[in-house]
């Protein structure tokens, strides 16, 4: 048995990616460039009429503590598998040309980007629905855990019942 | 033999991130029971709905059958995104 650290040997947050023709899944510490990802997701034989992107950022939960940042733990291997499964399900339910999901891990500061979901489709309805679906399932199935860093110590963020309820509406 | 992994609060409370479990219980439910027998702390932490499980990186219910060499992870409800 050994004590943990977020970046210990064998479970370090190296960049890992899964690219399956039109589905790109990346888990990494580094920040992402929204413009670059947008241009990549629509650059597929010019069939996309719509691109919907969602960016999630680190916010102050405003619950009285002086929050200085966030630490994101994950389960290497399962995160990519889970995100790929979710993206593939979205691609089966709606007519989608391409999906990109990028989720950061490691130490982040208030205001930093955490996650990107970009969906390209012929039509905006499919793009909006697929993007929302992917986020709802990412929040309830993908193995990431957030810990707030504050002046009074580090506090794990609790999962929300409302997220589970939202996912069940699909 | 199973490779057991713990994440987030569970990892911290049990002060363990992974270890090899020498036998292979028949099901996930049996594994929870055997791990809970280690101590009251292990029992409180693992023998609860708040401890989700994955077998070979897929979320698993207690009825899932285990085989030798499986990777089993226990973790709290996820909070990504």
Image (cartoon, rainbow, N blue to C red):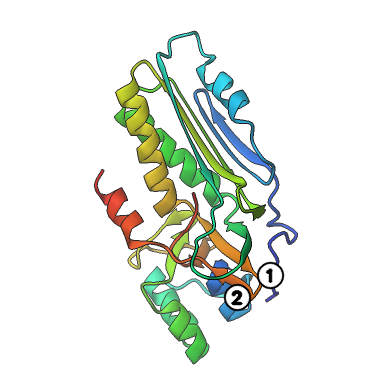
Name the residue at 63% across, 66% down: A149
Q: Position of residue A14 (x, y in %)?
A: 70, 47
* Alpha carbons under labels 2 and 1: distance apart: 8 Å
Q: Quadrant of residue A75?
A: bottom right
Query: What chain is tagged by disc 2?
Result: B
Quarter of the image with the N terminus of chain A is bottom right
Q: Mark 2: which secondary structure?
A: helix
Q: Position of residue A5 (x, y in %)?
A: 70, 66
Whether residue A169 can be seen here? yes
Quarter of the image with the C terminus of chain A is top left
Q: Position of residue A119 (x, y in %)?
A: 44, 27
Tag shown at residue A4: 1
Name the residue at 47% across, 51% down: A142
**In front: A92, or A149?**
A149
Give the residue number, with chain letter if any, for mark 2. B12
Q: Residues within 10 Å of mark 2 (few under 14, many from 20)?
A: some
In the shown orientation, is residue B30 left or right of residue B6?
left
In the shown orientation, is residue A24 left or right of residue A168?
right
**In front: B64, or A49?**
A49
Q: Position of residue A106 (x, y in %)?
A: 66, 54
| Furthest residue toward top | A46
The mark total stands at 2
Q: Mark 1: which secondary structure?
A: loop
Query: What chain is tagged by disc 1?
Result: A
Name the residue at 47% across, 58% down: B79
Do the CB atoms of the residues marked 2 and 1 lie less than 8 Å apart?
yes
Name the residue at 38% across, 23% down: A96
| Furthest residue toward bottom | B40
In the image, residue A50 above or below residue B78: above
Q: Quadrant of residue B52?
A: bottom left
Q: Are marks 2 and 1 on the same chain?
A: no
In the image, residue A3 above or below residue B79: below
């Amino acid at each position: 048995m050994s004590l943990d650290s977020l970046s210990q040997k064998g479970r370090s947050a190296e960049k890992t990616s899964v690219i399956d023709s039109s589905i790109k899944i990346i888990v990494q510490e580094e920040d992402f460039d929204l413009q670059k990802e947008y241009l990549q997701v629509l650059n597929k034989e010019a069939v996309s009429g719509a691109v919907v992107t969602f960016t999630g950022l680190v916010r102050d939960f405003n619950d009285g503590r002086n929050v200085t940042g966030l630490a994101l733990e994950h389960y290497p291997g399962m995160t990519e598998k889970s995100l790929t499964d979710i993206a593939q399900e979205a691609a089966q339910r709606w007519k989608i040309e391409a999906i990109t999901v990028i989720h950061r891990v490691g130490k982040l500061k208030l205001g930093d980007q955490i996650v990107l979901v970009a969906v390209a489709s012929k039509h905006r309805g499919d793009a909006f629905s697929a993007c929302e679906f992917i986020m709802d399932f990412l929040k309830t199935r993908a193995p990431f855990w957030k810990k707030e860093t504050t002046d009074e110590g580090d506090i794990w963020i609790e999962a929300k019942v409302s997220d589970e309820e939202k996912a069940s509406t699909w | 033999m199973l490779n057991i992994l713990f994440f987030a609060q569970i990892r911290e409370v049990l002060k363990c991130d992974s270890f090899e479990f020498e036998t292979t219980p028949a099901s996930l439910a049996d594994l929870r029971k055997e791990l809970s027998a280690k101590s009251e702390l292990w029992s409180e932490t693992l023998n609860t709905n708040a401890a989700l499980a994955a077998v070979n990186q897929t979320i698993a219910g207690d009825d899932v059958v285990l085989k030798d060499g499986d990777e089993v992870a226990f973790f709290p409800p996820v909070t990504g995104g």
